[in-house]
Image (cartoon, grey):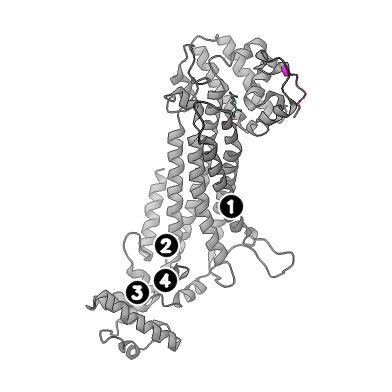
Amino acid sequence: MSDKTPDAIKPWGGRFSEPTDAFVERFTASVTFDKRLYHHDINGSVAHASMLGKAGILTETEVQAIVAGLEAIREDIVAGRFEWSVALEDVHMNIEAELTKRIGMTGKKLHTGRSRNDQVATDIRLYVRDEIESLCGTLTRLQEALLDLAEREADTIMPGFTHLQSAQPITFGHHMMAWYEMLERDYSRLQDCRTRLNACPLGAAALAGTSYPIQREYTAQLLGFDGPTRNSLDSVSDRDFAIELAAAGSLIMTHLSRFSEELVLWTSAQFDFVELPDRFCTGSSIMPQKKNPDVPELVRGKTGRVNGHLVSLLTLMKSQPLAYNKDNQEDKEPLFDIIDTLRDCLKAYADMMPAIKPKKDNLYKAASKGYATATDLADYLVRKGIAFRDAHEIVGKSVAYGIEQKKDLSELTLSELQQFSDQIGEDVFKVLTLEGSVQSRNHIGGTAPDQVRAAVANRRAAMAAR
Ligand code: ARG
């Protein structure tokens, strides 16, 4: 990175009589981080130049020279041969100055009818749009892995929890489908964000539009936007789409953080519910027995930075008067970090999910403890004509007796159970089994193995139509 460029090179230098203070130059520059937008900046410039040609504002020869020059610059950047200059402030001025250096006078015509304000607003939209597509791809991979796991483990019984206390038996497949549903809403939130951001700001220029006979629909179409934005002031100033992405990102991280918490608990010696392969874990430098679930822990920890960036972006936008303000340059680092974090965390989960192996015996044993079929006994009594509140009382007493005898409900004899209600018969043992309990919850959204298989099939079909 060279910062020896003479001040005369600054595209806005005309009205200035002294060079920029060295610190101010560094303080106001964004090229160190916004250079990552170069692809989208060049795509935007190529579309803008083509529109200027179509509208007769530039000649065809000029457009060809600009496009060829920009493509050659792109190649050099990709190959790592481009020298970025802090004196040229940002990605936009670096590329434009280089274009003029290479093709002369014509390069200076590219910025006709455009401002960096509509240029940067376009670049970030294009960038976020691409990143949403790639995040949705990884999210889909993770969801597919969850569907496979849910299908494989549709019959696997485990304890379901409320307050982290044994509540009712459920199936492992059902638990996986809960994670799937959270991610499905995350997917649709990202798509919503994409729908709203997909309008082209080019033509808004600095804030008020431009006096050239531009064709905004054409530029929008070249860049794959649904159309031009409808108000020039709004186009250059609002970054609500970045905030929407951050909010959707915070929810994705919140969900992944909850998954992580469960995986951390489940891989502990105390729960011992699942096996995470060694390649997703690390050891301890002092305790030789340790196999730590670092990947889920890091994902859980990284939720904090995404939530923090959401607050940064909201605060950055708050109180800004219309239209563009330099404050907006501060949108990029949080936005980039959100996207990098989401990409890595989703990848970690998509890679890890197919390798998760439930320990069926341990899950079954854990489900047998904690009187998880107590509700089933109450429901049984209700079917025999007892009011639910009375049934609740009867089962409560049976549980207290079981605790005293150190026996589960299914281990009590018929006569022991009949001490609490004469309505209890031999058929009770069917409902007190874990299998009977999960199979009885056989309705849409219930934990019965058949419902889990139906939900998997239903979601597979929905995903194929995406
Ligand atoms: N680097 C600036 C940004 O990220 C580009 C727009 C600059 N516009 C201006 N009027 N100073 O927002």
Q: Position of residue 48 (x, y in %)?
A: 53, 19
Q: Position of residue 331 (x, y in %)?
A: 57, 35
The tag earlier along the polypeptide, 2 or 1, is: 2
> Where does label 3 land, which residue?
375
Q: Nearer the viewer, residue 99 or 275?
A: 99
Find ligand 1 in the image and state its quadrant: top right
Q: Mark 4: is the Cβ under 8 angstroms from ligand 1?
A: no
> Where does label 1 land, which residue?
348
Q: Residue at x 59, y 72 (%)?
A: 269
Above or below, comparing residue 305 to residue 365 in the picture: above
Cα distance, mark 3 to mark 1?
Answer: 38 Å
* Quarter of the rendering occupied by the N terminus: top right
Q: Secondary structure at mark 2?
A: helix
> Where does label 4 land, which residue?
167
Q: Residue at x 69, y 63 (%)?
A: 283
Q: Position of residue 194 (x, y in %)?
A: 46, 36
The tag earlier along the polypeptide, 1 or 4, is: 4
Callout 2, which amino acid? His
Q: Residue at x 53, y 26 (%)?
A: 324
Quadrant of residue 61 in the image? top right
Q: Are marks 4 and 3 in contact (CB under 8 Å)?
A: no
Q: Nearer the viewer, residue 95 or 158?
A: 95
Q: Residue at x 60, y 54 (%)?
A: 301
Q: What is the number of callouts on the image?
A: 4
Left or right, 33 with respect to 51, comes to: right
Single out the residue that lies furthest toward the left.
385
Inspect the magenta stretch and tell me whether residue 4 lies in it: yes
Q: Which label sits on residue 174?
A: 2
Q: Secondary structure at mark 3?
A: helix
